[in-house]
């Protein structure tokens, strides 16, 4: 079969979601759905011919045939080539709940087949590395260069895809010379003062936002203003990251507050500002994030919390994930699932099906909490398109995403769609 262009049936989502189990209890918590068994009807045996009327008769109420619903075929083939066959669209399926995003690299957009799959499935995009400080900062001037992400921003603008700006202030992937006097990269370089570093931070945030919002107006709808600033084990009373954060060491604990202050100052009015972190389901980290978010909310400078959600097959429990999601939503802020993947180190059919169940239970949890007004999730972003391109796949033996290297769907894809063929348990 010759590969065809990708497509999908927008009405297909109705078929996929028709058999979703619905939880009866309103509130945070997981429930097991009851299985519904379908018993075929049995027709009575006729022992003698029924008399034939001599004239057409009006049908009586008792004789009227009851309409019957067709038995829906349950999917059994989960490995569908997206090059040859139509598949449902994730973004279309979840449009009444949240946007569905994808984290990409510039190389992903150089592949025409991947590009078609991206356009079919997603309506939000995040740059994997191309908008981080080490990709934008040029020490020689120093100036900012956007050649790393221009093509990705242009792609979004041309195709009507929204982008999450990732990320403005992060302790990692920012060059040390950015904190030094004279932008020196020598071993004996000296840190600048707090005041100078605040000026550099504000100038950096201003330049990034002004360039993006002027050159690609309306493309970026949300910014990860600060990333991973919480590390309760570092000893700060508020749980701030200390040991490997030059932002903290040069400016102080309030660098987060200042970053959000500057971001609000230069952001377009419709852009949302987020704090983003990993392991948000850990109790100590969750409490520190809530405290931080509430403080910045009082200043009027934050709109949401990002839960990165790099999770495993059994950890965290969905109970812990649910608790964090509910606690973050109780702040009144939006929640984004920003970097979702499930670390799986086996590609047996049995384990891939288990991964599909894990995805289904997670998306089912999101749907249930939103249906019962217990969570305000406005975006879910997968951290990568295919298994072979995942950041986890350094050894070639990780299978964390929805599509394999052949651009085939996996049970994980159908689980994210809540397909009846993927059991919850």
Image (spheres, grey):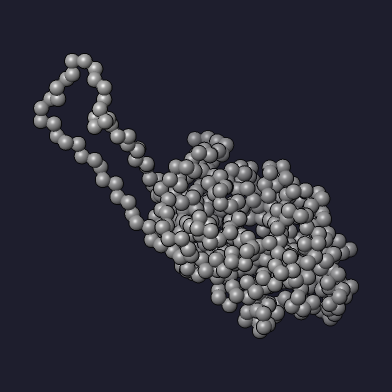
* Rendered position, 84 above or below 61: below
Percent x, y for residue 94? 54, 49
Q: Relative to the observer, which residue lies in front, 184 or 38? A: 38
Quadrant of the image occupied by residue 50: top left
Percent x, y for residue 120? 59, 43
Residue 70 in sight here: yes
What residue is at 68 percent from the left and 61 percent from the top?
Answer: 303
264 with respect to 378 (left or right):
right
158 with respect to 50 (left or right):
right
* Rendered position, 93 above or below 184: above
Q: Relative to the observer, which residue lies in front, 181 or 200? A: 200
Residue 350 in sight here: no
Q: Relative to the observer, which residue lies in front, 338 or 37? A: 37
Percent x, y for residue 133? 76, 64
Identify the image quadrant of the C terminus.
Answer: bottom left
What residue is at 40 percent from the left and 45 percent from the top?
Answer: 75
What residue is at 26 percent from the left and 22 percent from the top?
Answer: 58
Q: Total marks drawn? A: 0
Q: Report the residue that reaches farthest toward the top.
A: 54
Percent x, y for residue 194? 84, 77
Quadrant of the image occupied by residue 301: bottom right
374 with respect to 78 (left or right):
right
């Amino acid at each position: 079969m010759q590969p065809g262009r990708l497509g999908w049936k927008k009405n297909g989502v109705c078929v996929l979601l028709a058999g979703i189990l619905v939880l009866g209890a309103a509130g945070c918590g997981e429930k097991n759905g009851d299985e519904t068994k379908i018993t075929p009807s049995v027709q009575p045996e006729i022992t003698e011919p029924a008399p034939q009327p001599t004239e057409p008769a009006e049908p009586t109420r008792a004789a009227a045939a009851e309409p019957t619903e067709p038995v829906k075929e349950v999917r059994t083939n989960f490995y569908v080539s997206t090059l040859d066959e139509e598949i449902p669209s994730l973004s279309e399926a979840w449009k009444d709940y949240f946007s569905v995003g994808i984290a990409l690299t510039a190389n992903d957009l150089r592949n025409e087949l991947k590009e078609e799959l991206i356009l079919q499935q997603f309506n939000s995009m995040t740059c994997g590395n191309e908008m981080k400080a080490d990709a934008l900062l040029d020490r020689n001037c120093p100036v900012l260069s956007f050649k790393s992400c221009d093509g990705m921003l242009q792609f979004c603008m041309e195709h009507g895809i929204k982008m999450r700006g990732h990320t403005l202030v992060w302790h990692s992937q920012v060059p040390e010379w950015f904190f030094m006097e004279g932008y020196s990269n020598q071993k004996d370089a000296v840190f600048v003062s707090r005041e100078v570093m605040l000026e550099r931070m504000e100038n950096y945030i201003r330049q990034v936002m002004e360039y993006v919002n002027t050159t690609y107006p309306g493309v970026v709808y949300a910014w990860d203003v600060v990333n991973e600033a919480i590390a309760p084990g570092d000893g700060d009373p508020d749980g701030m990251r200390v040991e490997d954060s030059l932002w903290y060491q040069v400016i102080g604990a309030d660098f987060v507050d200042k970053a959000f202050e500057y971001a609000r100052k230069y952001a377009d009015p419709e852009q949302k500002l987020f704090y983003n972190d990993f392991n948000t389901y850990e109790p100590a980290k969750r409490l520190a994030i809530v405290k931080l978010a509430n403080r910045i909310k009082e200043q009027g400078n934050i709109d949401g919390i990002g839960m990165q959600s790099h999770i495993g097959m059994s950890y965290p429990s969905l109970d812990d994930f649910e608790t964090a999601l509910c606690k973050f939503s109780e702040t009144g802020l939006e929640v984004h699932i920003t970097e979702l993947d499930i670390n799986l180190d086996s590609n047996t059919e049995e384990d891939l099906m288990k991964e599909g169940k894990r995805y289904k239970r997670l998306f089912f949890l999101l749907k249930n909490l939103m249906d019962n007004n217990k969570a305000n999730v406005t975006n879910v972003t997968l951290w990568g398109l295919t298994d072979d391109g995942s950041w986890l796949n350094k050894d070639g033996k990780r299978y964390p995403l929805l599509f394999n290297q052949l651009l085939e769907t996996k049970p994980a894809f159908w689980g994210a769609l809540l397909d009846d063929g993927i059991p919850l348990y």
